[in-house]
Image (tube, helix red, strand yellow):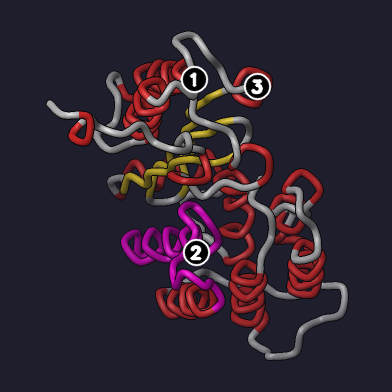
Amino acid sequence: MSQEEQPRRPQEPVKYGDVFEVSGELADKPIAPEDANMMQAAETRVFGHTQKGGAAAVMQSAATANKRGGFVHPGDTTDLAAERGVTVAQTDVPGARVTTEFVGGQVVGQYVEPRPVATAAATASEVLGLNLQSAITIGEALEATVQTAGNKPVDQSDAAAIQAAEVRASGTNVIAPGGISASAQSAANHNATVDRDEDKIKLIDVLAGATGKLSADKAVTRQDAEGVVTAELRNNPNLSTHPGGIAASITAAARLNQKSDI
């Protein structure tokens, strides 16, 4: 093979920000071999195997490329991964099980697995403390979001989804000063001016105890879910909803209410 035909080494390493929607210091870190090994071990503990096309597979490919390029060496670990961990967590919400993968405290993968109605009903009771004879309310569904996406910084799509949910819960278009919608909008405005995720206001700060913060509440319906999903989509530059986020929780609650005929 001639010199010109020799494969060229990449000019830059594959960084977390190149393959995952992460921010801050982690986004600029090259994916290291031990990071990938830790994710592979975490996925195996939870699923019994690594996920095809999942975070571990992506990280392994990136780490291999980085080793070939000479940017990392076998046994290397990213400092943030070593300090804050590489983990896989599962949370049951009404109608689904949400699996979230983290590196250095940031989400790098999420899977939503629909659950059978009977299991979903039991899950709703466990997660939200509901009497199975009662329908899941908008406030309860918002509180469930804390468990699946509580560490997500509040953005404009979240604020819009929360406002849509509060409007439907109260039955009025009047937004109460100091209410949950006002708090969400204030958080989104603040976060837009802050660079570091650790300094941003998270969903858990806004949605914890959501039921008590609403002036009125009601059982979630399919129409409520559609309204919240639309609001979140329209205010997301990527025209998508956040996995395990507000729209996902409201939709899961509406599905459970409808199937259970509560």
Specify few, some or many for label 3: CA neighbours under 10 Å numbering under 14, 14-19, or 20 or more: some
Q: Residue at x 76, y 84 (%)?
A: 175
The circle drawn on residue 257 is none
Nearer-the-camera pick, 220 or 228: 228
Q: What's the CA distance linking mark 3 and mark 2?
A: 37 Å
- Report the side of 123 relative to 201 (left or right): left
Q: Residue at x 43, y 77 (%)?
A: 226
Instruction: Give the amino acid at mark 3.
Output: Asp
Magenta-span inclusion, residue 10: no
Residue 109's spot in the image, x, y percent? 44, 41
Q: Is residue 135 visible?
A: no
Q: What's the CA distance linking mark 1 and mark 3?
A: 13 Å
Q: What's the CA distance linking mark 1 and mark 2?
A: 43 Å
Q: Give yes or no for contact between labels 1 and 2 (Cβ–Cβ under 8 Å).
A: no
Residue 58's spot in the image, x, y percent? 35, 34
The magenta span reads: 235-262
Q: Establish if 6 lies above or below 245.
A: above
Q: Residue at x 80, y 64 (%)?
A: 193
Q: Establish if 227 lies above or below 132.
A: below
**Residue under pointer 2:** 250
Residue 131's spot in the image, x, y percent? 53, 49
Outermost residue on the left side: it is 1
Nearer-the-camera pick, 49 or 59: 59
Q: Earlier in the sequence, mark 3 or mark 2?
A: 3
Secondary element under disc 3, as helix, strand or loop, is helix
Q: Is residue 261 visible?
A: yes
The circle drawn on residue 79 is 3
On-image quarter of the C terminus: bottom left
